[in-house]
């Protein structure tokens, strides 16, 4: 967590890598058993991912250099007991680009599931590494290089684009290994077998989009700062049935707070507090990010439910007198208030 503005914090959204509840077990396993299952998946990938051919890597859309970086992250596992999460996340420079596994992680005895998750999180680690070292990115990577191929500094923020890319790589890696006979077939989304995606990429895109929109509600779409805020869609959160209300923030929108004006884009972003419709407003051109207000924004008409507040540990925030306006083409399109 990055400290800003008198103990107000930017709470970076973390990768939750949700799977369908009917694919999870309900009983927490012991830490030694968890570590054994994670270790089995580590060893499996260190053997089989390392031995994929150039043709196999082409199916995954990655280079051999990227594969080698992924293997380094997969070898770097840490554990945590985070009360707000129950899965794993990929780290950044501050923790050595480690994959951190929550001790409450479930379904760890399913090797295909673990392979998919570890590759997903390793790709998050790689995105963090490339943000810190854009000169190590592949030529043609438009996130970390300009049109001439020169390395550029990218905002350090997770996006729906990144989540889709990470899950796609995890699923396709697992699918290739299933196709090679190293794993039994596996399904995660809409009962589609992973091997179906090898011949039907549109089906994979459809399933990944549905997964991302359900599990990563309120993440920004891309580095332009486009984002749609709405109520959470996680099965363990009561959103009050309020699924129609949406606030759409676009690149170029003007944000007015206390007489100050900011323009969305170029590192000025609004993002959710861990997928809830409780909004952080930050300058991501700085490292760590700088909060542009002292508090968080809740938009009128998109007030979070108590369950949503509790899910992200913000059930005690209260409204202040500060107001917020979103102006587009000279017209106020949304209003809100600052909460602390």
Image: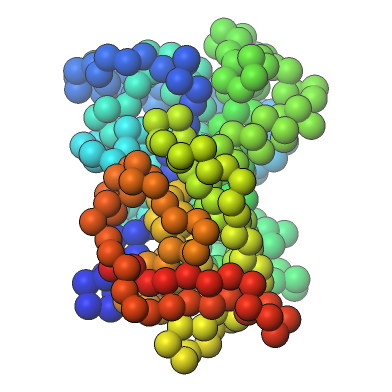
User: Can residue 3 be seen in the rendering of this structure?
Assistant: yes
The residue that appears at 66% across and 38% down in the rendered structure is 209
Residue extending farthest bottom:
259
> In front: 66, or 207?
207
Which quadrant of the view contains residue 140?
A: bottom right
Nearer the observer, 171 or 7? 7
- x and y, in percent, of residue 326 in the image: 58, 75
Considering only vertical position in the picture, is 237 above or below 266?
above
At 43% across and 78% down in the image, what residue appears? 323
Q: Is residue 67 visible?
A: no
The N terminus, quarter of image:
bottom left
Q: Nearer the viewer, residue 54 or 299?
A: 299
Vertical comparison of 3 with 97: above or below: below
Q: Identify the residue shown where x is 68% and y is 80%.
A: 331
Relative image position of residue 273 (x, y in whole percent): 40, 56
Q: Is residue 72 left or right of residue 267?
A: left
Which quadrant would the C terminus be assigned to in this image? bottom left
**Residue at point 67%, 30% (across, down):** 207
Counting every numbered tag in the picture gives 0
Task: Give the color scheme: rainbow, by chain, secondary structure or one colour.
Answer: rainbow
């Amino acid at each position: 967590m990055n400290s800003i503005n008198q103990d107000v914090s930017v709470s970076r959204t973390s990768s939750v890598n949700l799977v369908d509840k009917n694919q999870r077990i309900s009983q927490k396993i012991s830490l030694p058993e968890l570590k054994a299952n994670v270790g089995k998946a580590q060893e499996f990938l260190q053997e089989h991912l390392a031995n994929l051919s150039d043709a196999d890597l082409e199916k995954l859309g990655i280079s051999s250099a990227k594969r080698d970086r992924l293997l380094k992250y997969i070898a770097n596992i840490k554990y945590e007991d985070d009360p707000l999460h129950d899965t794993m996340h990929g780290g950044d420079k501050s923790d050595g680009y480690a994959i951190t596994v929550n001790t409450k992680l479930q379904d760890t005895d399913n090797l295909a599931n673990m392979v998919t998750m570890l590759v997903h999180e390793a790709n998050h680690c790689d995105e963090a590494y490339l943000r810190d070292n854009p000169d190590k990115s592949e030529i043609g990577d438009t996130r970390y290089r300009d049109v001439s191929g020169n390395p550029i500094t990218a905002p350090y923020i997770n996006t729906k684009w990144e989540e889709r890319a990470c899950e796609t790589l995890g699923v396709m890696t697992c699918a290739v290994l299933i196709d090679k006979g190293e794993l039994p077939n596996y399904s995660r989304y809409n009962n589609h077998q992973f091997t179906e995606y090898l011949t039907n990429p549109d089906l994979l895109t459809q399933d990944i989009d549905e997964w991302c929109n359900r599990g990563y509600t309120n993440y920004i779409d891309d580095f332009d700062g486009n984002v749609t805020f709405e109520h959470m869609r996680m099965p363990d959160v009561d959103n009050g049935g309020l699924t129609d209300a949406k606030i759409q923030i676009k690149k170029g929108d003007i944000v007015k707070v206390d007489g100050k004006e900011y323009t969305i884009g170029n590192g000025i972003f609004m993002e959710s507090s861990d997928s809830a419709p409780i909004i952080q407003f930050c300058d991501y051109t700085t490292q760590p990010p700088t909060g542009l207000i002292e508090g968080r924004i809740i938009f009128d008409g998109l007030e979070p439910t108590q369950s949503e507040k509790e899910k992200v540990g913000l059930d005690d925030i209260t409204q202040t007198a500060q107001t917020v306006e979103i102006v587009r083409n000279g017209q106020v399109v949304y209003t809100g208030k600052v909460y602390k």
